[in-house]
Image (spheres, rainbow, N blue to C red):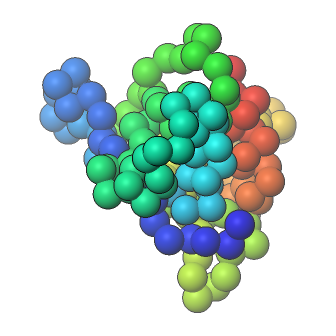
């Protein structure tokens, strides 16, 4: 679970969103993509490896969240902003090889997290972000 190689996430909605709100492609750590791939391979088989998925552009944003949730019920299109591809930290990362996720995915996890009234996602980022375990749990709980 320490593989932090970048796994691609496609920029989506290029036809639906006017400039400058066209989502940019981003990446997540390979270890996090492995979590989503487990459900992907359960649904569709493993004839397409993670390596092949990465070569073909990776998961789409909505698709990635879908594979964490293991449910298609109520999945809304993920809203985008011009800077939503920027990195959000993951706690416990190596200083020399920091582990990050795109800001848009942190916002998805934040929807399940909001522990403290008045706290913001920006404050959480300043404190080092989510731990790996928190991130996976929150993405699975996303509603």
Question: Can you give x and y, in whole percent of width and height, for residue 43 in the image?
Answer: 58, 28
Q: In the rendered image of this protein, does residue 24 appear above or below residue 117?
A: below
Residue 25 located left or right of residue 28: left
Front one among 118 and 16: 16
Q: Residue lying farthest bottom?
A: 96
The residue nearer to you, when weighing 85 against 35, is 35
Work out which residue is located at the far front of the displayed protein and give it.
47
Above or below, 82 against 143 in this view is below
Task: Residue at the far top: name it.
Answer: 74
* Foreground of the two, 64 or 91: 64
Residue at 30 percent of width and 50 percent of height: 56
The x, y position of residue 138, in whole percent, is 74, 38
Q: Give the residue displayed 79% in from the left and 49% down from the top.
A: 134
Q: Quadrant of residue 67?
A: top right
- Where, quadrant-wise, is the C terminus in this rendering? top right
Residue 65 visible somewhere in the drawing: no
Q: Is residue 35 left or right of residue 100?
A: right
Q: Is residue 62 above or below residue 74?
A: below
For the point 74% across and 58% down, which residue is it? 132
Question: Is residue 23 at all visible to an observer of this figure?
Answer: yes
**Residue at 53% in and 44% down:** 46
Would you say 17 lies left or right of 123 here? left
How far across and down, in percent of the image, does residue 34 sit?
A: 61, 53
Q: How many marks?
A: 0
Q: Nearer the viewer, residue 85 or 31?
A: 31
Q: Could you say where residue 69 lies in the image, as x and y percent from the top left?
A: 67, 29
């Amino acid at each position: 679970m320490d593989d932090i190689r970048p796994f691609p996430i496609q920029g989506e909605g290029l036809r639906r969103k006017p400039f400058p709100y066209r989502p940019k492609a981003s990446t997540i750590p390979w270890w996090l993509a492995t979590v989503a791939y487990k459900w992907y391979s359960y649904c569709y088989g493993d004839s397409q490896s993670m390596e092949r998925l990465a070569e073909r552009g990776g998961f789409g944003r909505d698709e990635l969240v879908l594979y964490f949730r293991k449910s298609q019920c109520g999945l809304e299109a993920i809203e985008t902003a011009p800077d939503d591809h920027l990195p959000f930290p993951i706690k416990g990362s190596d200083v020399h090889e920091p582990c990050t996720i795109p800001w848009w995915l942190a916002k998805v996890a934040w929807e399940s997290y909001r522990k403290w009234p008045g706290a913001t996602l920006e404050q959480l980022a300043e404190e080092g972000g989510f731990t790996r375990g928190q991130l996976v749990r929150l993405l699975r709980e996303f509603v």
